[in-house]
Image (cartoon, rainbow, N blue to C red):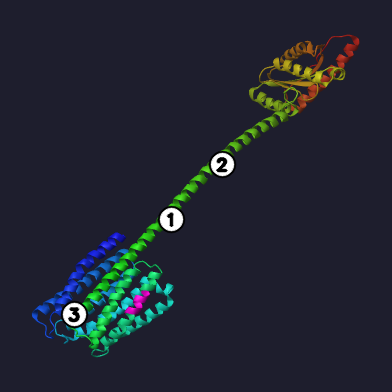
Amino acid sequence: MDERLRAFAGARLRVILPVALALPLAAFAQPDAQAGSGDLLTNLIATVFYVGFTAALLLKSLLQFFTNRDRCYVVYAGFAFGTGLGLLALGLLHGFASGEPTGRWTTTAEPFGLALAGLCAALFTREYLHTAARSPRLDLALKVFAALFAIALASTFVLPGDYPSTLIAGISPAFALLATACAIHGRQQRRPGATILIAGWTAMLVGALLFLATHSGLLRPAGLPIHALQLAWTFGVLTMSLALAERTGSNWRERVARHAEELASLEHSIESLQASEQFLTQGMAQRSQEIESLTHRLQESEQRFQQMAHHDPLTGLANQLLLTDRIDQGIIRAKRHNTRIGVVMLDFDEFSAINDSYGQDVGDEILRIAAQRLRSIVREQDTVARPENDQFVIVLEEVFDMNDLQRVANAVTLVAGEAIQVEGQTFMLDVSMGSAISGNEGSNAVTLLKQASKLMRRAKEGKRLNRQQGGPRSIARA
């Protein structure tokens, strides 16, 4: 951007300076007060050139405003318009009639254009250098001169003769000096384009001094002073345009740098978020594994709890709770399929003597072996339970009569009569049994178990009497 700006400024200066310097020298070559045809042509070309160049800068500033929406370009457009109007009036007043007015509009256009240029220049300097926030004292002085130029602008329609031009001629050098000081202060604050602004206001100060000198009569208005004044003000307008372009370029560079920083910060934030997301994902995966493991352990614990709640821990058979449920569910199924359910309760005779003589470990092993043998003689849908110490209950489903119960009782008798080997000792067990079968509407687990228990105790008592008399084993039947 800086290289394009310098190339643009160099091209402009290479075009304007040779032409602008040649024109005043050509005009100064005629010392006579009366202008000849060659002088008129030279003055016409110079005036058209300066005014046209200023108009081009005015159009460029308006285009820049619509592009950038920067208020400085609007204020600068007013400054360029006022300067161009003043240059045109100066050329018409002093370049063609040797100081004689060519019409009412020229005498009004000169102070009006220069006052408008001064007012816009004061506003432009305040806006460009931000003096309201950075230099309050200089800003106050600029406000005062802006008010003076506004008064001069209004006086062009009120005061007669050269009074407005005299007021402007007195104000302009002081204001140009103040604007130059503001530009120097801006350079100290490293404001973009302040150096170019110093050159521009220096040229405007030279032009203001020449305008004061010609207006006060110290210099003749025709010839070199007028063209030098036009050159100085045109150069000032050009350099201010270049300073404004450099300021715009600096703003764009700052904006690009800021956007780059924001982009880098955004990328860093995205990377941080991605890292956080990865960390959270890993954490969630770990927590999921922990939850899954905990769920599995809970399921296992629940299964163990269910096993402990419904099964005997020694033999693995159904306990009293599960036994009652199996009988009640079996009765429901039996009614649905028009069958019956049978219950066989058995108890080992004098089993407590084994525990007392050989210890509880031996008794527990005998119970485990007996449980396995009882489970081997029943069907898959039947249930073998151990509700108490040496007491077992067999629940038979799909039973039709007492013959089915008797066949199971005979099998139990055969199994129980087999010898059991535990730790090198041989044990022969004897059992007492009682049975019950569902049949009436009031049958349930409680009634069947009570009936079977009652008959088992009767059989146990009968066997005790038979053993006293030397008789064989027997089974009580419901």
Q: What stretch is highlighted in magenta?
A: 176-182
The residue lying at 24 percent from left, 76 percent from top is 232
Residue 360 - label: none
Determine crowd level at label 2: few under 14, some 14-19, many 20+ residues with C-alpha closer than 10 A.
few
The residue lying at 29 percent from left, 67 percent from top is 242
Q: How far apart are marks 2 and 3 (CA)?
A: 86 Å
**Numbered disc 2: secondary structure:** helix
Please identify the dominant SS of the magenta region: helix
Left or right, 450 with reference to 115? right
Left or right, 140 with reference to 91? right
Q: In which quarter of the image is the C terminus?
A: top right
Magenta span contains residue 397: no
Residue 283 - label: 2
- Residue 228 at x, y percent in the picture: 21, 77
- Residue 298 at x, y percent in the picture: 65, 35
**Numbered disc 3: secondary structure:** helix
Q: Quadrant of residue 411?
A: top right
Left or right, 276 with reference to 391? left
Closer to the eye: label 1 or 2: 1
Q: Earlier in the sequence, mark 1 or mark 2?
A: 1
Pick whichever, 384 or 184, lies toward us. Answer: 184
- The vertical placement of 22 against 349, above or below, is below
Give the labeled residue for mark 3: 224
